[in-house]
Image (tube, rainbow, N blue to C red):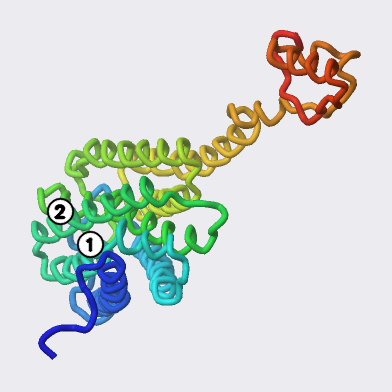
Amino acid sequence: MDQLPIDTSHPAVREYLALVRLQVLTPLSLLINIACVATCAFVASPSLSSVSKLYPTALTPNSAVIASYVAALYVGQIGYCVMLVLTRSAETKRAYVNAIGLFLPFANLFMALWAIAWVMRWFLLATILQGLILLLLLFSNVALFIYHPPEHARPLGIAFVHAPLRFFLVLPFSILFELSLFVALGLSYEPTSPGAPPRDYSSWHAMAGFGVVLGTNLASLIVVVSRSDLVWCAAATWIAVSIWSASPKPAPVYITAITFTALHPLAYIFSKLYARCCSPSARRNRNIVLPGDQTAHPGLYGATSTGAAATARARQNGGEIETGPTEVDAENWG
């Protein structure tokens, strides 16, 4: 029993052991995340939302909207864990092991610790934890996109591997890290009464909030347009709704959040239309013509020197001329 009857140095064995490790640690970390966040939200006093009300900022979101976002995130991660256990695809297994690895379990554990730090009002620690979550998820998403990009031939991989990772990334990127940082830096105001704005408009720190909302949403807009990313579009729109639906809000933050609530879906629709109608691949697809009489339409068939030479050789040899789909020559077409 001193030595296992298998060669643990073999790459296939090491990959299998890494997959088994993920199949145990990922659901366990998700369970810890759900348990800690639910306890801090519904049992602890003050709760997560109560602390947010005690330290309101220009970025403080609507608690109900954020709660629904987190619930959707947990549903996606449950699907991720089911896919992790049941998948038989070698490509999907490599994505789990090589691109994501332990980054997601660590992000779940840090999220649980953040909930505890938030209700304990350890705002500096909460900010550090959100920063670590952001770095872990950013690295795993970039690695997943570069080495295992989403493919439409594998819709389950998109739904239960790529989507939960991106949905999780948008949460600290767009709201939680910035909210923790604002409170840690003292960029909050003292509420005069429940739901009432501060008496001094300058204490809103409105321009700082405006800069954060504008910057994060512009970055999200670039991602949505460049990649036609439906998941990022939905997540960024959800966060924008959570910001403007919470009152009171300074006008620059409120107007910016509402604007991007409309811009994100429009940008996604525009990017899909561009890819379908105006992209280079779409133009190439339109330049295919049906086979016809090459002698009657010299501008369409055999226009290039290579095509003309091939046609002449075929006629000299008495062979048949291939009349498959031919790409239109732009100069002869006019």
Q: Dot 2: within a 10 Å radius of its alpha carbon, few (fewer than 14), some, or many (20 or more) residues?
A: many
- The amino acid pointed to by label 1 is Ser
Q: Nearer the viewer, residue 317 or 12?
A: 317
Question: Quadrant location of residue 270?
Answer: top right
- The amino acid pointed to by label 2 is Val
Disc 1 target residue: 52
> Which quarter of the rendered picture does the N terminus lie within?
bottom left
- The label on residue 246 is none
Question: Which residue is rendered at x = 28% and y = 79% of the image?
Answer: 24
Disc 2 target residue: 183
Question: Which residue is rendered at x = 42% and y = 57% of the image?
Answer: 162
The answer to whether any part of residue 60 appears in the image is: no
**Residue 11: where, in percent of width, then height?**
27, 64
**Residue 260: where, in percent of width, then height?**
44, 41
Q: Nearer the viewer, residue 67 or 91?
A: 91
**Tally of numbered tags:** 2
Q: Dot 1: within a 10 Å radius of its alpha carbon, few (fewer than 14), some, or many (20 or more) residues?
A: many
Q: CA distance from mark 1 to mark 2?
A: 9 Å
Question: Which residue is rendered at x = 84% and y = 15% of the image?
Answer: 316
The answer to whether any part of residue 307 appears in the image is: yes
Question: Quadrant location of residue 70?
Answer: bottom left
> Which quarter of the rendered picture does the C terminus lie within?
top right
Q: Is residue 207 above or below residue 83?
A: above
Q: Nearer the viewer, residue 167 or 254?
A: 167
The residue tagged with tag 1: helix, strand or loop?
A: helix
Is 129 on the left-hand or right-hand side of 89? Answer: left
Question: Which residue is rendered at x = 48% and y = 61% of the image?
Answer: 157
Closer to the N terminus: mark 1 or mark 2?
Answer: 1
Q: Extreme front residue here?
A: 317
